[in-house]
Image (cartoon, rainbow, N blue to C red):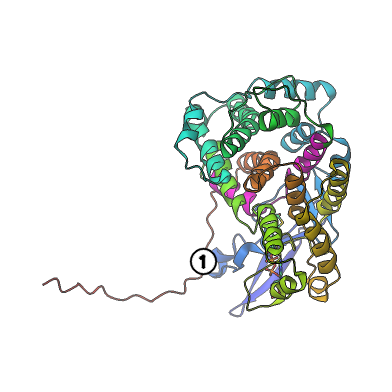
Amino acid sequence: MSETAKIELDGKVFELPIITGSENEKALDISKLRGQSGYITLDRGFKNTGSCTSAITFLDGEKGILRYRGYPIEQLAENASFLEVTYLILKGELPTADQLAAFEEKIDSHTLVHEDMKRFFEAYPAKAHPMGILASMICSMSTFYPESQDPNRSEEAFELSIIRLIAKLPTLAAMVYKNTVRHPFMYPKNDLGYVENFMYMTYGMPTEEYKPDPVIASALNKLLILHADHEQNCSASTVRIVGSSQANLYASISAGISALWGPLHGGANQAVIEMLEMIKEDGGDLDKWIAKAKDKQDPFRLMGFGHRVYKNFDPRATIIKKACDDILGKLGVNDPTLEIAKRLEEVALNDEYFKARGLYPNVDFYSGIIYKAIGIPTEMFTVMFALGRLPGWIAQWKEMLDNGDPIGRPRQVYTGENERDFVALDKR
Ligand code: CMC
C-alpha cells in the first residue's frame, strides 16, 4: 500500500500521496489538493517545492553530496573529460571508448557557426555585456535551423539540435570574447580536444602559433565538469519551464543563459572579482566590508559566500579550492586582488555570523579567482559558467519532454484590489 499523509482543512481530512525518491527523500504530492479542497500551497522562491521528478543529478545540501547519474562529483572531476561527463549527463550512462570517440567526432563536425552570425557582432555596442550577446546568439541559432522549431520532430532531429548546440557554444563563446577584446575571430581547429579548441579560439591569434597550456586546460576541464549540472536551480528551472511550452531547444537554453546572468546565480563569479577590486580600491579594510555584509540595513553581501542548498559545505568548492591553489602556484600569479580573496576567505570562515548561517565560499568564489588568474576578462566569467552548464540544461529540457511534463504554470495568492468600477475620465 502506498504511503499517504493526512491534512485537515476547514474540518475535512484530505489524503496526500507521499512520493519517495531513490535516495529516500520524501515529498507530498499536492497536485490534486486544489481540485479537492480549494487550497493551494504558497512557497515563495520555491524553497520547499519540487517541480518535477528527475534522474539526472542528486544533491544533499546538508551532507555536501553532489552526484551526476549516481557518480560522485569528486571522482568525475578528478578522472573524466568534460565531453565524457556531457555524454553521461545526457544519456544516463558513461560512454565506452568507442561511444566517446563517436560522440567527439559528431561534435567536431559541427563546431563552425554560420558565417552570417559574424555580422550580428557588428551591431552590438562596444561595451555590450557578453551574456547579453551570448543569450541572443543562442536564440538566433533557432532562426538558422528552423526545423528545430517543430515540436513533433524526429528523435534524430532532436539529437542534431543537441549536437549543434554543444559543438557551437564554445565557438560562439570564444567569438564573444574576441569581440570584447576587439581581436579577429579564430575558426575552430578540430584536431584539438573540446577544451583545448575553446582555448585556441579564445587565446590564439592568426599571426602566431598557439599551443594550449595543459595546466590551464586541466583547470578548465575541471571547472566545466563542476558546473555541468546542479538539478532544479534558477536557470535549469527556467529552461524546463520555457521548454514546457514546447519552445525550441535554442530558445529554452537562451532563457537559461539569461537566468544564469544574475549576480545571485551564475553572475556571482563576476560579482566576486568586482567586489574584491572594490575592496582593494577602498584601501583593503576587510573588517569594514565584513561589518557591512553583516549589517541588515546595508544591502551589501559578500559575493561568493552562501548557497541556497549547501548549508554545511559545497563539495564543488572543496575541489575547486584545491585546483585554485594549484593553478595560482603553477602559474606563479601575484595579484593583490587574489591576496584580498585569501584574507577574506580566512576572516569570514572564522566569523560567528558566517559560521552560524552556514555561509562559506561557494564555487563562484574560487572559479572567479581562477578565471582572473588565467586571463579571462571579468565580464566573460558567467559565459564560462554557461559553457559548463550546457549539458545539464539540455538534459533537464530533454527529460522534461520525455517525461511528458505539463506546461509550467504556477498559481498565486492574489493580494490586489477587489472588484471596482471603471470611472471614465472627464475628457472635456
Ligand atoms: N553575505 C552576507 N549575509 C548573507 C549572505 C552573504 N553572501 N548570504 C546570505 N546571508 C545571510 C542573509 O542575510 C540571511 O541572514 P538572516 O538569517 O540573519 O536574515 C541568511 O544569511 C540566509 O540568507 P538567505 O538570503 O535567506 O539565503 P538564500 O538561501 O535565500 O540565498 C544566496 C542564497 C546564494 C542567494 C545568498 O547566500 C547570496 O546572496 N550569496 C551571495 C551571492 C552568491 O554568491 N551567489 C552564488 C550562489 S552559488 C552559484 C549558483 O549555484 O548559482
Of the pair 308 and 292, the residue shown nearer to us: 292
Q: Position of residue 361 (x, y in %)?
A: 79, 60
Element type at mark 1: loop
Of the pair 27 and 305, the residue shown nearer to us: 305
Say above or below: 36 vs 337.
Answer: below
Dominant SS type (magenta): helix
In the displayed structure, does residue 94 sit left or right of residue 364?
Answer: right
Residue 191 lies in the magenta-colored region: no
Q: In the image, what residue type sits under mark 1?
A: Gln
Quarter containing ligand 1?
bottom right
Q: Position of residue 251 (x, y in %)?
A: 52, 40
User: Which residue is drawn at the image coordinates 79% and 25% (left, top)?
Assistant: 100
User: Which residue is drawn at the image coordinates 71% and 62% (left, top)?
Assistant: 280
Q: Position of residue 232 (x, y in %)?
A: 68, 52
Q: In which quarter of the image is the N terminus?
A: bottom right
Q: Where is residue 312 in the image (x, y as percent from the top left)?
A: 83, 64
Q: In which quarter of the image is residue 423?
A: bottom left
Q: Quadrant of the C terminus?
A: bottom left
- Magenta stretch in the rendered image: 216-244
Q: In which quarter of the image is residue 297?
A: bottom right
Disc 1 crowd, CA 10 A, few/some/many (<14, 14-19, 20+): few
Say above or below: 251 vs 156.
Answer: below
For this orientation, the residue located farthest to the left is 428
Q: Which residue lies under the disc numbered 1?
A: 412
